[in-house]
Amino acid sequence: MDKLLIQGGNRLAGEISISGAKNAALPILCAGLLTADTVQLSNVPHLQDVATMLKLLRQMGLRVEQEGNTVALNGRAVDKLEAPYEMVKTMRAAILVLGPLVARFGEAKVSLPGGCAIGSRPVDQHIKGLQAMGAEITIEAGYIHAKAKRLKGTRVVTDMITVTGTENLLMAATLADGETVLENAAREPEVADLANLLVAMGARIDGIGSDRLVVQGVEQLHGASHAVISDRIETGTFLCAVAAAGGDVTLKNARTNILDVALDKLREAGVIITSGDNWIRVQMAARPKAVTFRTTEYPGFPTDMQAQFMALNSIAEGGSRVTETIFENRFMHVQELNRLGASIGIEGHTAIIQGVDKLVGAPVMATDLRASASLVIAALAAQGETLIDRIYHLDRGYDRMEEKLSAVGADIRRVK
């Protein structure tokens, strides 16, 4: 099993190119199931979750051609309408094949999902929405069985804001009969990116980027070309790394307009940030100041940046409070950060952090994707050597992180 060995204390300087967004690429790949034509995608990141999704789609009969960061999908020969447990258990996003399969083929059999251990992420809203659209759904032996001759347009109000739920129902609605209105829809940029691809494929969608999506169903979708948006969470992670370790780094292929809240918090911490159309420069020469925040749905502070900012707060000047409102079990990195010398306590859904003068390297273990990133950030700022175990979590969501950090001066390498 691979591990990361990091010698802390190096300032970072240079350029890093940001990859395509994992959370946009996964639903966009599933959109290839909605048409018999070819969907041509660029800026697709090299990630374990992307490889798993492509393997699943191939199993279903989707023709996949991959070269570098481009992927061509052709759904003419899809003949297996099932996502088996052995595929879904490692990646919750596999649930995203459910809507497209039912919409285009009238049937789907999808295992109940697995994935990160950061808390329950129920799929009941997906099921509720598809049932409202006329699908007959049963759950037996750990599988969701869905059938519908053709989905019918309707108004769906989800009980909570759900990103994958919105994406699943949006894809399903594109081929439904009549108008579908999705209320309380997720507003994340990755949802908008999926919607923009669907429009390029011939879907009729109004309200993109808002919490109310109105979809006029069409008989069929056609092929299209689309570039996946840059990964705002990868961008934010590298910004936090420079803020913690110090330095001067320019992030290429990075957008500021989808990172507003995180950028505001970094400026509050004392980070100097300048930007252009597709680049962000981050400069840090002093100890960061502690920042307090509360995670919430977009456009609020992203839960996927909580762990990285907690690593930054660990070495910041002053005390801070971090409240997690999205996932109930997303403080598993606290114990590992404390092993490096951080001073973090937990009261319910709030972490109370008192910044320390220094962290000291130690063996630690990654517990989920974003927790892995927080440990890398802490290790870069720590004195001495840190060995991070279970970095397969990191590989699920970060494209060659150690190579990108090495290129800007970090002493980081992958060991077996």
Image: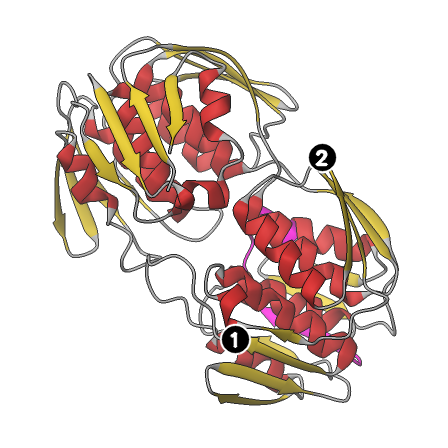
Q: Earlier in the sequence, mark 1 or mark 2?
A: 2
Q: Are marks 1 and 2 in contact (CB under 8 Å)?
A: no
Q: Position of residue 130 (x, y in %)?
A: 61, 80
Badge 2 marks a residue whose secondary structure is: loop
Q: Position of residue 400 (x, y in %)?
A: 52, 31
Give the position of the N terminus as an image quadrant: top left
Dot 1: element: strand
Q: Residue at x 63, y 73 (%)?
A: 98
What residue is drawn where x is 50% and y is 15%? 407
Residue 90 in sight here = yes
Whether residue 393 is situated above or below residue 252 in the rendered picture: below
Compared with residue 206, is residue 299 higher up or lower down, i.e. above or below?
A: above
**Percent position of residue 385, x then y:** 23, 21
Q: Mark 1 — residue?
A: 111
Q: Which amino acid type is marked by label 2?
A: Gly
At label 1, which amino acid type do we have?
Ser
- Asked if residue 306 shows in the view, the reply is no
Cα gap from disc 1 to disc 2, whole angstroms: 30 Å
Residue placed at 62% from the left, 39% from the top?
Answer: 45
Q: Position of residue 211 (x, y in %)?
A: 57, 60
Q: Which mark is residue 68?
A: 2
User: For residue 43, what is the image quadrant?
Assistant: top right
In-image side of 292 versus 254 (left or right): left
In the picture, measured across the screen, residue 56 lies left or right of residue 63, that is left
Specify start and end residues of the magenta stretch as a single range. 176-192
Using the rendered view, name the quadrant where residue 78 is placed. Answer: bottom right
